[in-house]
Amino acid sequence: MRIALIHLRHAEVGGTERFMNRIAAHLAGLGHEVAIVCRRHGALPHPRVRFVVLHGLAVGGAWRAWRFAQDVEAHVREARYDLVFALGKTWTHDVIRSGGGCHQTYLDTADRHARGAWERATGWGALKNRVALDIEAKAYAPGAYRKVIAISDMVRRDLMARYAIPPERIELIYNGVDLERFHPRLRTTAGAEWRRRAGFAPDEIVILFLGSGFGRKGLEPLLAAFAGARARAKAHAPGTPGRPELRLAVVGRDGSQAHYETIAQQLKLGDRVRFLGETRAPEECYAGSDLYVLPTRYDAFAFTILEALASGLPVITTDRAGAAELLGPEHGEVLAAPGPPAGADARASSDEAAAEALAAALERWCERGRIEVAAPAARALAERYPFALTLARTTDVLMQAAAERAREQRG
């Protein structure tokens, strides 16, 4: 079949982008003709995949998004694909995968924290958000799709509530993980080397925070919680010999990193927090750490949770990460994310409560014995979600939609 995968941006990094590359290569390997329709792209994920670049004139992020959606509609009308699979914000498709969840939910829970003070004060991004909402409404309108793929039950329920998607039209397919790339055996090799380069001692407990967009992913409450956990440990067991020191590794990219470094300084954390920048080898970071913490305000799934589990790390996260649905008490802890209160005072109180709860969780989990017990359970959980299973289930949904389309065309 001639299959089009639609996404404005093609790249080698990013959760949706990585999934797109994997499903494109998988479909091409099955013998299908696969085109990635995008505005810009990186390297081909498979020799039998081709790019179709739609680069209509547009200025600014909002107009780029709208123009790309328009260009996709025109291209699909002329190209005569057998199946169109959308992975982003467009409205022309047979199947659409909601990799980022509902945009309004993101705005309600995380947008304020993802933007700097200047952006919030000036209303920067309002037009782009309005366009995103309009595109999403068209994408999920009755008759706009044959199948919808949700990557977590949190997203599935949200989509059904907001857009009245019939239950038989929506499929829950969790993300998968590369079980060979992310593996506990790396702890004694690449993990140990990463730990040495980062300046962490072998007997320290290293807490890992990994991701771009520090505001949305909850770095600020984590810094406060980390300071609180260290204070709690000293107060409860002053002078306890042999108690391991805690370290926090912040891996990822954010334009406001200086702001978070200042917060760490104000909390007098010194070199106990290391800002290590972006990485192309996250498997080394997991392998060199002991506990993964993602206090996210909103993640439709969060690939990093599965990657951490596959690496043998217990996980602390919030109930606004879709992957939190997979966790049991033997794998880590799921905390309530801060609510979206209206006033500044209420927001501060909510954030303080969240930081306090996170500090208590860190204190519970930053024990070497508990981490060692949880490690094999974490790996066993991840092994239930290999990427191959995600690709196979996605392919099944695509083939069902293609068969339905073919029947309609014959009729």
Image (cartoon, rainbow, N blue to C red):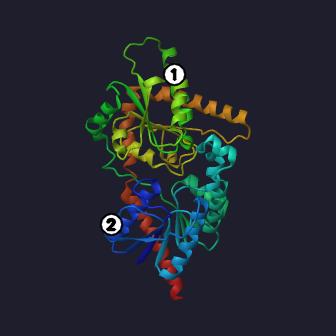
Dot 2 crowding, Cα within 10 Å, few <14, some 14–19, many 20+? some
Which amino acid, mark 1? Lys
Tell me the CA gap for discs 1 and 2: 49 Å
Q: Residue furthest bottom?
A: 411
Which residue does the numbered mark 1 point to in the structure image? 268
Residue 46's disc is 2
Examine the rendered structure and indicate whether residue 7 appears above or below residue 253.
below
Residue 314 x %, y %? 42, 37
Residue depicted at x 54% and y 48%: 299
Q: Is residue 8 left or right of residue 374?
A: right
| Picture quadrant where residue 296 is located | top right
Quadrant containing the N terminus in the rendered view: bottom left
Residue depicted at x 48% and y 41%: 328
Q: Nearer the viewer, residue 287 or 360?
A: 287
Residue 140's disc is none
Quadrant containing the C terminus in the rendered view: bottom right
Residue depicted at x 39% and y 72%: 34
Q: Nearer the viewer, mark 1 or mark 2?
A: 1
Residue 405 x %, y %? 51, 79
- Residue 376 visible somewhere in the drawing: no
Q: Secondary structure at mark 1?
A: loop
Q: Is residue 251 left or right of residue 197?
A: right
- Return the disc, 1 or 2, that comes first in the chain's sequence: 2
The answer to whether the residues at label 1 and label 2 have Cβ atoms under 8 Å apart is no
Residue 173 x %, y %? 48, 59
Which amino acid, mark 2? His
